[in-house]
Image (cartoon, helix red, strand yellow):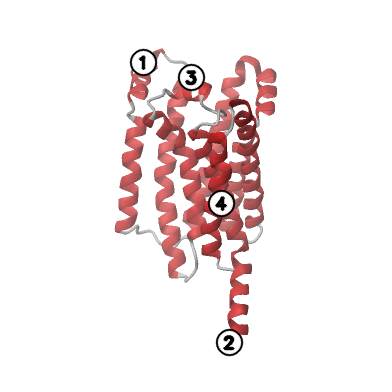
């Protein structure tokens, strides 16, 4: 099997379960997305652990932290668990959510740092700088969106929760900008080694989409973020489809990455038999 071809086919196939929610009635779409979001993240987390078992040292740690990132993301997408924690923590629940969010981001940052440790290259090249400039422009738009500026102006009257949400927004942008050189350098390193990097690129692109989808939705549809959180999630919206697609392509990238060597050996064996 050709891993590159298989991954392309899987990415196209992942569109179908993601787009289904757009055509479901409200109550069914609600149940569908509440099941599919954590399920896709669980599959991705388990696959990342499986990939981690293949490697040693930094690559092992990179995929372990990626799995932890996906598992933490899964936990906050399980509604019954969230409601239970809300009842347990009471008024302290928003603070608990913030701690979970920062912990989740920490896992992703550590994953990115270990990916950089794997690469011996440190020069991005022209295409790398163009990619960074492109996501930087997106980051500037996200951070300077009018509703965000209004919150920043009134931040002296805001509570810790509002301030933390603003910091999380900035952190999302910073992580996305950081992920771009990670994937560019990793891809260049693999090309030098004569190996494939499309699986890792797919995984990182899925993560970037999952981090930026809500902000792009907010800007394109001119809907404040707090309204998005209360009235758009789990309604069968475009945002739900984007989130599900991002989680599914992460899982697809990890699956093909896990099977890459096995399929590569099969291709060599078939070529030898054919010869």
- Identify whether 223 is placed above or below 135: above
Residue at 63% of width from left, 41% of height from top? 71
- Identify whether 63 is placed above or below 169: below
Helix, strand or loop at mark 1 = loop
**Disc 3 to disc 1, C-alpha distance:** 13 Å
Which disc, if any, is residue 13? 4
Q: Is residue 107 visible?
A: no
Q: Which residue is mark 3?
A: 160
Which disc, if any, is residue 275? 2
Q: Nearer the viewer, residue 131 or 20?
A: 20
Query: Which numbered disc, 1 or 4, marks the residue that appears first in the sequence?
Result: 4
Q: Nearer the viewer, residue 191 or 3?
A: 3
Q: Nearer the viewer, residue 202 or 72?
A: 202
Query: Which numbered disc, 1 or 2, marks the residue that appears first in the sequence?
Result: 1
Q: Which residue is mark 1?
A: 154
Query: Which numbered disc, 3 or 1, marks the residue that appears first in the sequence?
Result: 1
Q: Nearer the viewer, mark 3 or mark 4?
A: 4
- Identify whether 221 is placed above or below 19: above
């Amino acid at each position: 099997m050709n891993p590159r071809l298989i991954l392309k086919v899987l990415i196209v196939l992942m569109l179908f379960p993601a787009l289904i929610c757009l055509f479901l009635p409200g109550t069914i779409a609600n149940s569908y997305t509440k099941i599919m979001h954590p399920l896709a993240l669980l599959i991705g987390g388990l696959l990342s652990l499986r990939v981690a078992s293949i490697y040693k040292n930094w690559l092992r740690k990179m995929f372990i932290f990626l799995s932890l990132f996906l598992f933490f993301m899964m936990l906050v997408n399980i509604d019954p668990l969230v409601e239970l924690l809300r009842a347990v923590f009471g008024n302290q629940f928003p603070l608990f959510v913030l701690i979970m969010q920062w912990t989740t981001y920490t896992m992703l940052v550590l994953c990115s740092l270990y990916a950089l440790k794997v690469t011996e290259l440190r020069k991005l090249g022209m295409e790398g700088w163009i990619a960074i400039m492109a996501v930087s422009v997106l980051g500037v738009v996200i951070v300077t969106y009018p509703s965000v500026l209004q919150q920043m102006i009134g931040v002296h009257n805001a509570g810790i929760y509002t301030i933390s949400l603003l910091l999380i927004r900035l952190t999302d942008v910073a992580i996305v900008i950081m992920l771009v050189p990670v994937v560019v350098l990793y891809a260049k390193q693999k090309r030098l080694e004569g190996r494939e990097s499309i699986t890792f690129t797919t995984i990182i692109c899925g993560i970037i989409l999952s981090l930026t989808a809500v902000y792009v939705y907010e800007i394109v549809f001119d809907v404040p973020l707090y309204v998005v959180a209360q009235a758009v999630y789990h309604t069968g919206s475009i945002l739900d489809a984007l989130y599900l697609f991002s989680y599914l392509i992460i899982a697809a990238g990890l699956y093909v990455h896990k099977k890459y060597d096995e399929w590569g050996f099969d291709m060599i064996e078939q070529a030898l038999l054919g010869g």
